[in-house]
Image (cartoon, rainbow, N blue to C red):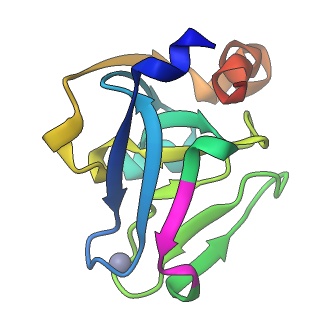
């Protein structure tokens, strides 16, 4: 697809540097800030990409896993600094959500953030499903 030609390589990771990853995504990004119970307290800003556009470069051994509720979402956080720089979202189990605030901004042209009403997850989750499709 011609869309692939427009993808940039972005890097990011946790606060202490133990966890580092690379994603391929547009230079002009659209993110979602969610108001569900866990995203609200973390102020998590989702950038959801297909799993084949995410590469964990280092820090596999630094990751801890937290799950709750349906246990479908895999909340990986760095056991050194506590930052959740990416995770597997319940809305997109075939994709990865990286925290846009954990991106190295040098390659990012712009970010437009769209609120996502995760408090009413059952009603709204379908609107995100396409984000993890290639
Ligand atoms: Zn860390």
Residue 56 drawn in magenta: yes
Q: Residue 40 lies in what quarter of the image? A: top left
Q: Quadrant of the C terminus?
A: top right
Q: From the top left corner, tell me how far across and down residue 68 is, in percent.
A: 74, 61
| Image point (85%, 51%), residue name | 70
Q: Residue 90 lies in what quarter of the image? A: top right
Looking at the image, residue 107 sits to the left or right of residue 2; the answer is left
| Image point (33%, 56%), residue name | 12
Q: From the top left corner, tell me how far across and down residue 73 is, in percent.
A: 73, 52
Q: Residue 31 lies in what quarter of the image? A: top left
Residue 20 drawn in magenta: no
Q: From the top left corner, tell me how far across and down residue 117 is, in percent.
A: 56, 20
| Image point (26%, 70%), residue name | 15
> Is 17 situated above or below 131?
below
Looking at the image, residue 37 sits to the left or right of residue 14; the answer is right
Magenta stretch: give its range: 55-60
Q: Residue furthest left?
A: 106
> Is 46 situated above or below 75?
above
Displayed-image quarter of ligand 1: bottom left
Q: Quadrant of the N terminus?
A: top right
Q: Toward the viewer: 119 or 19?
A: 19
Give the prevailing secondary structure in the magenta stretch: strand
Looking at the image, residue 126 sits to the left or right of residue 48; the answer is right
> Is 43 situated above or below 34?
below
| Image point (33%, 53%), residue name | 11
Q: Disc count in the image?
A: 0
């Amino acid at each position: 697809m011609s869309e692939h030609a427009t993808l940039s390589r972005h890097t990011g990771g946790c606060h202490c540097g133990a966890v580092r990853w690379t994603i391929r995504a547009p230079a002009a990004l659209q993110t979602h800030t969610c108001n569900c119970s866990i995203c609200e307290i973390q102020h998590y800003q989702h950038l959801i990409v297909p799993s084949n556009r995410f590469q964990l470069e280092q820090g596999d051994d630094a990751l801890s896993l937290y799950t709750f509720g349906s246990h479908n979402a895999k909340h990986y956080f760095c056991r050194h600094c506590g930052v959740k720089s990416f995770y597997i979202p319940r809305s997109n189990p075939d994709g990865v959500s990286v925290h846009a605030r954990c991106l190295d901004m040098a390659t990012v042209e712009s970010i437009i953030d769209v609120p996502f009403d995760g408090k009413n997850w059952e009603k709204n989750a379908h609107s995100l499903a396409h984000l993890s499709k290639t």
